[in-house]
Image: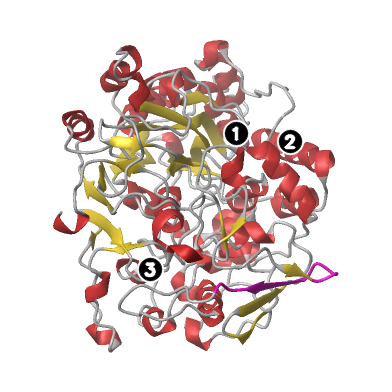
Amino acid sequence: MTKKRYLRVLALAAVLSIAAAACGGGGGGEATSTPSEPTGNVTKGGTYRTAIEDFGFTGAFDPTGEYLGSAWGLYSGMLLRTLLTYKHVLGLAGDDLVPDLATDLPEVSTDQLTYTFHLKPNVKFGPPVDRVITSKDIAYAFQRIDSQALVAQYGSYYDGVVEGMDGPVDKPADAINISGIKTPNDTTISFTLQQPTGDFLYRLAMPATAPVPPEVGKCFPKAGDYGRDVISSGPYMILGEDKLDISSCGSIKPISGFDPTKRLTFVRNPNYDPSTDDPTIRENNVDGVDIVIDTNTNDIFDKISAGELDGSWQSTPPTEILQNYLTDPSLKDKLHADPGDRTWYITMNTLVPPFDDIHVRKAVNFAIDKAAMLQAVGGPTFGQIATHIMPPTVLDFGGETYDPYESPNESGDINKAKEEMSQSKYDKNGDGKCDDSVCNNVLFVNRNIPPWTKYSPIIQNNLSALGITLKPRELDTGTAYTTIQTVKNLVPIAANAGWGKDYADPFTFADLLFGSGGILCTGQVNYSEAGMTQAQAKECGVTAEWNATHPDQWDTDKDIDHCEGLADQERTDCWIQYDKKIMEDIVPWVPYRWATNITVLGDSVTKYEFDQFAGTISWAHIAVNNNVNPATL
């Protein structure tokens, strides 16, 4: 079992003050975004038609394990309801917590350990479950999180926090009892914590905590399998959900509206009662959303221009298409660049030569031409060059410019890079180039779509100047993630990953990315293995590598716990020092871009909004006037 630590955290008021500062301002660029009505009055009905090269789901769309922000947008805006949620809008207001399934914010005990919620009456699951959601359905979601076989990728937000949750256990979900979760009746649920946890409410708004009907959930005891048959608790459901036969586990087939290789279509949930919701949270303007897989990026944007699609979703417009939208006055209002609260980065595995040497990792930071990488994606519209871990929209450095690997015009500094490499054990003659065989044909994982395919030659060329030759393996988005998420694969270096906040707090950039809580043998997100414990190394079968490379001072968990025990400016200052320590003393990444999220719209869109929580288009508020029936697609 993965070892989880016991978090010490700040008071709730301090978390909320951080939220108020978390998302101000964008990542730079020429396009901006505000809630809009591009073609006139907001319309009801129709279908938002879009496409993407690859869904890229990290947990096969099973809410228990899925850890992709774009999937969270689909869950939170359309498919699932949680005790608390967000308003699904741009900026600071988009980070405010509001009641969803709960009637109000919780009653909190005087010792800050017990949170009690009351559920709204008559909120129902979609067909064919067709029954009222109860407190036990929410408790069951936590039982799924606690089941080792289901690989809850962010389970550490609850392990060591909720009483009775100390790490995933080797039991099926329905055999697990969590002592800290009580359901005295169908409309009341309480959580008792192991210690005060001021950001616990944010954690209750994450999709893994959404209710799961046990009569269906029990049929999917393996990781990811429930993703093809997710039962709706929100205003929309997957097309064909109502045709499921749930009379027995054997009779359940994949919902027809979701084929991971082709399409995902949402239609209205007939059991959704708008009186149980708030239109400022979910307007539910469209009748549905249709997402198709199209591996040709140019084709996606050509279809938007031709009116065959209504807009993009997470796809990056090619440079020449972007320029059209930036320079053509008739197109400028169709391009939206929203603050993504996200860092794109190159990750280096600290267990694997040559990146087990900190001087090599520092040399790579000096060598990478970040300006070329920004230009490859399309320039400043897509964000600004990253100089450290946490984007300014998540952690305010108070105006300080911090760049420990500064280079002229951010184009790399090969002289400083060679200086670092000369101090490495892999540069025996001290000439600034690796002369050890471990630097030959180093496996490099990346995505097989633009702009990542444009990044690969830049990174290869930069590292070749240090004597490191890379062997690229460009994969579809989902496979690239699952490849680096498996510890035993020991992938040396990868550029496919980015990280957006889980909620408006620096903790969400620290805990899972660099703490032991982010290391799972399968489904990890701490790809560098920084902070790996000896027990984890043994469990995942990498004991030899761990013993060789991980000195005691790499206990990043202690640093995380220390910052979480502070409040207000003292806490912010602690996170700033933490970010600096990661960049200078551990050096697991080359952060290269603080991203904006780009969305291109067609003429049919009558309202656009951005969901700050998920970092994607707001499905709860989008509107179109195309009169397309999603059930016919």
257 magenta-colored: no
- Amino acid marked by disc 1: Pro
Q: Which residue is mark 2?
A: 576
Q: Is residue 507 left or right of residue 616?
A: right
Which one is earlier in the sequence, the residue at label 3 or at label 2? 3
Report if the CB atoms under discs 3 and 2 are less than 8 Å apart: no
Q: Residue at x 33, y 12 (%)?
A: 327
Determine the CA span between mark 1 and mark 3. 34 Å
Residue 390 against residue 629 in the figure, above or below: above
In space, the residues marked 3 and 2 are separated at their CA atoms by: 40 Å
Q: Which residue lies under the disc numbered 1?
A: 391
State the colouring used for the structure image: secondary structure
- Residue 395, given in percent of the width and then of the height, sits at 67, 36
Residue numbers of the magenta segment: 109-120
- Asked where in the image residue 263 lies, by quadrant, the reply is bottom left
- On residue 352, the disc is none
Relative to the observer, which residue lies in front, 486 or 220? 220
Judging depth in this view, the residue of 269 and 305 nearest the camera is: 269
Which numbered disc, 3 or 2, marks the residue closer to the eye?
Answer: 3
Question: Which residue is disc 3 drawn over?
Answer: 232
In magenta segment, residue 113:
yes
Q: First in sequence: mark 2 or mark 1?
A: 1
CB-based contact (under 8 Å), mark 1 and mark 3: no
Residue in view at x 61 percent, y 32 percent: 359
Question: In this rendering, is residue 611 above or below 5?
Answer: above
Ranked by sequence position, the earlier of labels 1 and 3 is 3
Q: Amino acid at mark 2?
A: Ile
Instruction: Pick the residue in front: 182 or 144.
Output: 182
Q: Is residue 12 left or right of residue 408?
A: right
